[in-house]
Amino acid sequence: MAGRGPRATGGGRRQTEDARASGTRAEDSLVSDLVPDAAVVRIRDLAGRPRGTGFVADHHGTVITSHEAVDGLARLVLHAAGDRTCLVTADAVTPLPALDLALVRTEGLDVDPLPVTVRDRVESGTYVRIAAGCWREARVLHATSVTYAATDRFHLLDEAMELAIGTDGRDALRLGGGAAGGPVLDAGTGAVVGVLGTALHSGHRDVGFAVPLRPAPGGPLADLRARNAATVPASGADLNLAGVLELTATSVGQD
């Protein structure tokens, strides 16, 4: 039997914390390998301050982001990989504050669109990847009511997604940290199931929140979702029309 070693002090705790941090970094690195940074569009004000992120949802360059990222701005600059930028004015923005979402028309970013989920809801326990400083892993806990604090008024959102995420991830989701509007991807299908919110509040402080991208009955978001489903292939539980056409073409090509 091994002899009893020296009494554990803070060093043991530090080693444990370092190991956890190392594991988190390795996990985040793996997620980054699976999802390219080029998929994310970064949003800044004219002074260069980060306002949020977003993703392209169709081949016309329409960006879905959080309302927080554009709230109160007359002009904003969107940045994509390869130093590509696009300056837009308020008339290029479709604000949807009641959903904490916004749609932004852009040109010249040359970013491939991401597929959007076709499901009505995301099950509790689903693992997701979130764009918050880097690509991180999180887990959907459940749907919950939150309050979105826009500049002009408060909005009650009934079914925001509550996310379990590590300490580093929670820090990245702080208000003003630039993570607002980041896509939340289903780890299995790669489809976007929601966007991150940093101005969403409830009684729980140790979790993150995201706004779900669910089918809408009509309006600009519904139109965008329809274009996405018809032109950006998704598979698995998020199989859409474009995915079916892609599978059919592959099958025909193999015959």
Image (cartoon, rainbow, N blue to C red):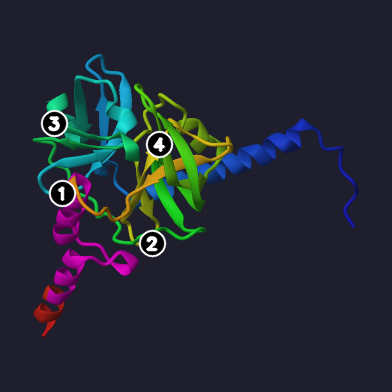
Q: Residue 73 versus residue 186: which sits nearer the camera?
A: 73
Instruction: Give the structural element (helix, strand or loop) at label 1.
Output: loop
* Residue 188 percent location from the top left of the image: 38, 62
At 15% from the left and 61% from the top, the residue drawn is 230
- Of the numbered discs 4 and 1, the one sitting upstream in the chain is 1
Q: Do the residues labelled 2 and 1 touch (CB within 8 Å)?
A: no
Between the C-alphas of marks 2 and 3, the distance is 33 Å
Q: The residue tagged with tag 4: helix, strand or loop?
A: strand
Disc 2 and disc 4 in contact, CB within 8 angstroms: no
Q: Which span of residues is magenta-colored? A: 220-248
Q: In whole angstroms, how far apart are the C-alphas of marks 2 and 1? A: 21 Å
Q: Does dot 2 land on a helix, a strand or a loop?
A: loop
Relative to 221, 12 lies left or right? right
Tag 4 residue: 197
Up/down of 77 relative to 188, above or below: above
Instruction: Identify residue for label 3.
Output: 92
**Is residue 220 something that shows in the picture?**
yes
Kindly indicate the quadrant of the structure image that contains residue 87.
Answer: top left
Bin the neighbour count of mark 2 within 10 Å (Cα to Cα): few under 14, some 14-19, many 20 and up: some
Q: Where is residue 104 in the image (x, y as percent from the top left)?
A: 18, 35
- Nearer the observer: mark 2 or 3; the answer is 3
Which residue is located at x 18 percent, y 45 percent? 220
- Which residue is denoted by mark 2 in the rendering? 188
Q: Earlier in the sequence, mark 2 or mark 1?
A: 1
